[in-house]
Image (tube, rainbow, N blue to C red):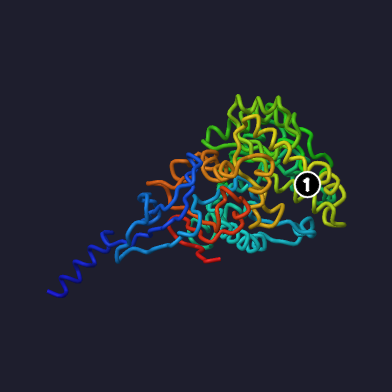
């Protein structure tokens, strides 16, 4: 008889009848759909999903696990739509590429991924690296290492000599002639092959360098880099695969070409004109400002020897302009998703973007919305993430204090749950 009871208990447990629930008591809960702060809410999580959200503090049964966040503000896991998870700024960055093997890049990336998650960013869009970013995404998905959900571009696509040409700045004997396999294209046929190759390697999104860039060892930081037919070939081919294309762009003409081609998002947008803003609104194009990157690059440029001279001059000239562009784009009504360009500055400091965006005029709760719901909409995963509600994946974070009143508290993340699993819980 005893063995039958034990067997019956095993069946009940294995069928999930007694599966442990996690109940979060939230003193404050940010509803990112309505941009309101709700008080005294309970979030019931089972497995990797949110089962329900109820008003008041739900009683706890013997099989439940309680997370007491009555003195904190709870919100969806944050989303950074522009990071470079493989690398981090350093005075030796431009020679590290000659020293580091793929394994070195991978091992260095592990702490960057972990610190990003611990900072409350449960989902990121990686905007280009060596391809190690794809392996890191897979390792995180397979629970081999700790980090955020990664949607990655793999290797960015550029023309010969463009911002993402990996041979910029090296001696001619080392330059070779990289092609679509390395993300370097010339003409629409190359463009199609580069996209197909990126998808074959495992990219979730395509990233193009529509203009020059600040931190590449190339002379110009703002001129357009693709012809219209090349951009159109990239967007059309990506569309066939059902994936988006993001365009790094500082100069206005390159942005116009990208928007005309049907690009999904403009990254940085430093010298964006009101005409381009209107084009973006009409085309429903997203804008990911990355103000923190611009501010950081301008500051690093003041340190003697930190950047090569060609990079230093561009950083001083272009970097700090992004905040003003963001302010104008926001006032104009351009769709904005939160992105920082982490890696240009230390990973884990992504919260600084909250400070810069509110400083430029975006209300606190709208910035949090841009870093949650809007990020999910940009990625096309709003059916799974971005909001704390029944049926969504349980990506939930908490901060000490009330960010609706003091956005600076976003740097003090005390609780991180991703997919129902608690990765961080502290009283600090």
| Vertical relation: 12 (above or below) 154 | below
| Vertical relation: 26 (above or below) 318 | below
Q: Quadrant of the N terminus?
A: bottom left
- Residue at the disc numbered 1: 216
Residue 198 on image: x %, y %:
60, 43
Q: Can you name the residue that lies furthest to the bottom here?
A: 2
Left or right of 131, for residue 212: right
| Towards the viewer: 379 or 36 | 36
Total marks in image:
1
Q: Residue visible at 86% across and 46% down?
A: 313
Q: Can you name the residue that lies furthest to the left here?
A: 1
Near mark 1 (Cα within 10 A), the count class, few <14, some 14-19 or many ≥20, is: many
Which of the 4 image quarters holds residue 370? top right
Q: Is residue 200 visible?
A: no
Which of the 4 image quarters holds residue 413? bottom right
Residue 95 on image: x %, y %:
79, 58
Q: Is residue 327 visible?
A: yes
Left or right of 207, for residue 25: left
Which of the 4 image quarters holds residue 252? top right
Q: Quadrant of the C terminus?
A: bottom right
Residue 99 on image: x %, y %:
75, 62
| Towards the viewer: 99 or 9 | 9
Left or right of 91, for residue 202: left
| Towards the viewer: 354 or 341 | 354
| Vertical relation: 295 (above or below) 34 | below
Q: Residue visible at 24% across and 67% down?
A: 10
Q: At numbered mark 1, what does the secondary structure look like: helix, strand or loop?
A: loop
């Amino acid at each position: 008889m005893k063995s039958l009871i034990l067997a019956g208990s095993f069946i009940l447990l294995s069928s999930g009848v007694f599966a442990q629930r996690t109940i979060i008591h939230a003193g404050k809960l940010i509803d990112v759909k309505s941009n309101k702060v709700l008080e005294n809410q309970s979030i019931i999580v089972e497995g990797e999903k949110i089962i329900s959200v109820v008003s008041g503090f739900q009683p706890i049964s013997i099989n439940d696990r309680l997370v007491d966040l009555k003195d904190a503000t709870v919100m969806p896991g944050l989303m950074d739509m522009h990071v470079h998870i493989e690398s981090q700024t350093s005075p030796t960055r431009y020679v590290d590429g000659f020293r580091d093997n793929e394994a070195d890049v991978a091992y260095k990336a592990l702490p960057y991924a972990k610190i990003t998650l611990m900072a409350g960013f449960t989902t990121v869009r990686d905007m280009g690296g060596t391809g190690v970013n794809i392996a890191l995404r897979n390792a995180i998905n397979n629970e081999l290492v700790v980090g955020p959900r990664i949607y990655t571009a793999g290797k960015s696509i550029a023309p010969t000599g463009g911002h993402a040409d990996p041979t910029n700045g090296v001696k001619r004997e080392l330059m070779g002639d990289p092609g679509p396999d390395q993300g370097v294209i010339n003409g629409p046929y190359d463009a199609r092959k580069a996209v197909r190759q990126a998808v074959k390697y495992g990219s979730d999104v395509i990233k193009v360098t529509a203009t020059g860039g600040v931190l590449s060892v190339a002379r110009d930081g703002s001129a357009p880099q693709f012809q219209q037919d090349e951009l159109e070939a990239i967007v059309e081919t990506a569309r066939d695969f059902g994936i988006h294309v993001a365009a790094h762009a500082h100069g206005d003409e390159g942005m116009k070409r990208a928007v005309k081609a049907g690009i999904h998002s403009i990254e940085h947008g430093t010298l964006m004109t009101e005409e381009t803003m209107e084009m973006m609104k009409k085309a429903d194009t997203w804008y990911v400002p990355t103000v923190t990157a611009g501010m950081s690059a301008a500051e690093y440029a003041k340190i003697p020897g930190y950047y090569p001279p060609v990079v230093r001059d561009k950083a001083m000239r272009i970097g700090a302009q992004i905040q003003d562009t963001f302010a104008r784009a926001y006032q104009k009504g351009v769709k904005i998703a939160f992105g920082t360009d982490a890696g240009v500055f230390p990973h884990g400091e992504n919260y600084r973007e909250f400070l810069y965006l509110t400083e430029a005029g975006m209300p606190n709760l709208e910035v949090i919305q841009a870093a949650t719901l809007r990020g999910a909409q940009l990625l096309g995963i709003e059916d799974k993430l971005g909001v704390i509600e029944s049926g969504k994946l349980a990506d939930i974070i908490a901060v000490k204090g009330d960010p609706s009143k003091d956005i600076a508290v976003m740097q003090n993340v005390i609780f991180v749950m991703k997919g129902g699993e608690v990765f961080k819980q502290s009283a600090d």
